[in-house]
Image (spheres, rainbow, N blue to C red):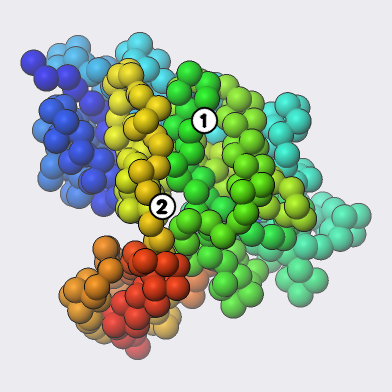
Amino acid sequence: MSRTLLMIGGGTQAVPGIRMAKDRGLFVVVSDRNPDAPGFADADARLIADTYDVAETTAKAVEFHSQTRPLNGVMCMATDVPHTVAGVAEALNLPTIGRTTADLAINKLAMKQKFHLDGVAIPWFGEIESADHLKTVLAERGSPLVIKPIDSRGSRGVLRLTERVDVDWAFATAHAPSPTGRVMAESYLPGPQVSTESVVVDGVAYTPGFSDRNYELLDTYAPHMIENGGDLPSFLDTKARQDILTVVQHAADSLGIKNGIVKGDMVYSDGKAYVIELAARLSGGFFCTHEIPLNTGVSTVAAAIKLAMGDAIEVQELTPKFNRPVVQRYLFPKPGRVTSVNGLADAAAMDGVEFVDCWVQPGDQIIPPVHSGCTAAVVIAVGDDHAQALTRANRALSLIRVETR
Ligand SMILES: Nc1ncnc2c1ncn2[C@@H]1O[C@H](COP(=O)(O)OP(=O)(O)OP(=O)(O)O)[C@@H](O)[C@H]1O
Ligand SMILES: [Mg+2]
């Protein structure tokens, strides 16, 4: 009997991983709350369970394990549920980073407290109890500060506070997306932002994923912090990159990750590397599925499947085979109701355009960008150099027409 992997979360961005696991001969079980989850189409078996509900998913997984077919591994991708993955893995004694580490990784405040304790480079931070408390902190520390929910995702409620921002509104906006109603502030670190994705093997972080994050829309959509894609390889020099990798390793050690995937939100500010957060899972936003493999020929998804199954990973698998320029950009249509979507095929047919996707259709409502889910489409292009990849990505994006009224 083939070995069995449980993929927690069957969203569109998990589909490449589900297919890869099946291609490697695994029997793949997918769990999701939504009976129409796209990942179910490729699954060998399905469990209907809320990915965020550790108890429900664990109960369903244990039942499947004992009554239908033993599970040999569990993972997630493009969904922020390392705690559910760890809960299931601990219940079934499967390879895992452990629940304690996973719980730190989904709580931005607890994570920063641990980083602080261990001397990992982070910005100043503190919990914020109320709008009045925020006013006091602003008076003491000055702006800009970043305020955010301690346990949300996709930059929901993450705001850069300058003098112009209404403090009562900001507190309420950061508070609303937090399931536990808790908010924190940090000093805003100016400087280049980087996404990293590492595979930690026996305590050593190998980092094939290293992308500059494009924040050219930071002022346009302020105070919301909206990222518009990424550029690989990074323009940072060797020293800056090495400094960032050192902080990634320090942060992974601090969270106690011996074998696992870590996705870093990193900033290089004033000649020093900092971590904003370290997610203990594969990235979303097509970074692990498209950008890293196109840039390096390395698949962190393949590595994550191996880690989940307890299979050995050779260091060569994580070593970039090439360094091809890749540019990813998102489409932010004019807010309103979508009346038509055109040009996707033309964009996809362009030379060097490796990936095009659009997730809105006529009738959908486009809201002004307030978090990273407010995009409508993405393009990923490669080139002989960065300029060519960028030109191709922008040209492809201009061919996609999402009309709104
Ligand atoms: N203190 C800070 N200084 C500079 N930039 C920051 C700071 N805090 C957050 N950011 C930027 O805003 C992004 C979103 O913040 P954060 O990662 O805390 O929230 P999130 O909901 O996990 O969002 P995402 O899914 O985009 O990472 C960060 O990845 C980083 O680019
Ligand atoms: Mg983040």
Q: Are marks 1 and 2 in contact (CB under 8 Å)?
A: no
Residue tagged 1? 205
Residue under the image location 48 percent in, 33 percent down: 206
Residue 152 in the image: state x and y as whole percent.
53, 47
Disc 1 to disc 2, C-alpha distance:
19 Å
Dot 1 amino acid type: Ala
Tell me the kind of residue under disc 2.
Asn
- Residue 239 on image: x %, y %: 66, 47
Can residue 129 be seen in the rendering of this structure?
no
276 to 223, vertically: above or below: above
In depth, the one of 297 and 276 nearer the eye is 297
Which numbered disc, 1 or 2, marks the residue that appears first in the sequence? 1
Q: Residue 63 vs residue 241: left or right?
A: left
Query: Outermost residue toward the right?
Result: 140
Q: Give the numbered dot on residue 323.
A: 2
Above or below for 249 versus 339: above
- Nearer to the camera, 148 or 263: 263
